[in-house]
Amino acid sequence: MRGWIVTGATLIGVLCGCYTDNSGSSSFTPGEVIATSGVPSVSASPPPQQNAVIGATIRATTEVTTIDASGNPSFAPGTAAYTVANLQPIAQTNSYTEVTGTLYSVDVTVQTISGVVTVHPWSFALRTSDGTNLTPDLNAVSNGLPATDLPQGQKVSGPIAVDVPPGKSITEIVLTDGYGGRQLGRWTVA
């Protein structure tokens, strides 16, 4: 017998996906850049790109997996505009975050375009020049990016922060379809 371990009411899995309309044509491209500044936009987009510079907005689609009370999974695609901006060193604001290098934060804004999108700080990694992915510390900043399911038309913002080891620098911020999952977008630090 196949079983599911569910923590809370719903198990959320985020998978890379592509939504097609009834004609079978793709209505977006994962990692598509849709704006280069300002608030995420749902207007027409330039040619698809998975890479952008920090401050730009990338449109990406994920699939939210939910498990009903009977243990049956259902899958629903969701598309959102993700903006990453303002990478900067910050001062430590609490005594329970152990910082061994320099604490850096970056502001993240997510606006759902269609469906429902699962937002979580661990969907992001700040990558150093040697390729090391640094996972955000959930306690390092006040009013950080929340972990939530975001319905169509809603927007959420907040900083995420990482402890950058001495002698290392951040070269890019990566968006994945879950902790350690497939890459959906990448912002390079100019």
Image (cartoon, rainbow, N blue to C red):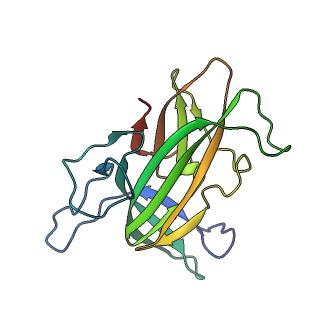
Q: Position of residue 162 (x, y in %)?
A: 65, 38
Q: Position of residue 34 (x, y in %)?
A: 28, 53
Q: Residue at x 69, y 72 (%)?
A: 8
Q: Position of residue 173 (x, y in %)?
A: 48, 38
The reply, left or right, for residue 177 in relation to residue 145 is left
Farthest residue toward the top?
167
Image height check: is 32 above or below 99?
below
Q: Residue at x 41, y 44 (%)?
A: 55
Q: Quadrant of residue 19?
A: bottom left
Q: Residue at x 51, y 22 (%)?
A: 129
Image height check: is 123 above or below 171?
below
Q: Position of residue 148 (x, y in %)?
A: 58, 66
Farthest residue toward the left?
23
Nearest the eye: 70 or 144: 144
Q: Quadrant of residue 1?
A: bottom right
Farthest residue toward the right?
95
Q: Residue at x 59, y 68 (%)?
A: 11
The reply, left or right, for residue 13 in relation to residue 144 is left
Q: Quadrant of residue 27?
A: bottom left
Number of numbered discs overlaid on the protein picture = 0
Nearest the eye: 55 or 50: 55
Nearest the eye: 50 or 12: 50
- State the quadrant of the C terminus: top left
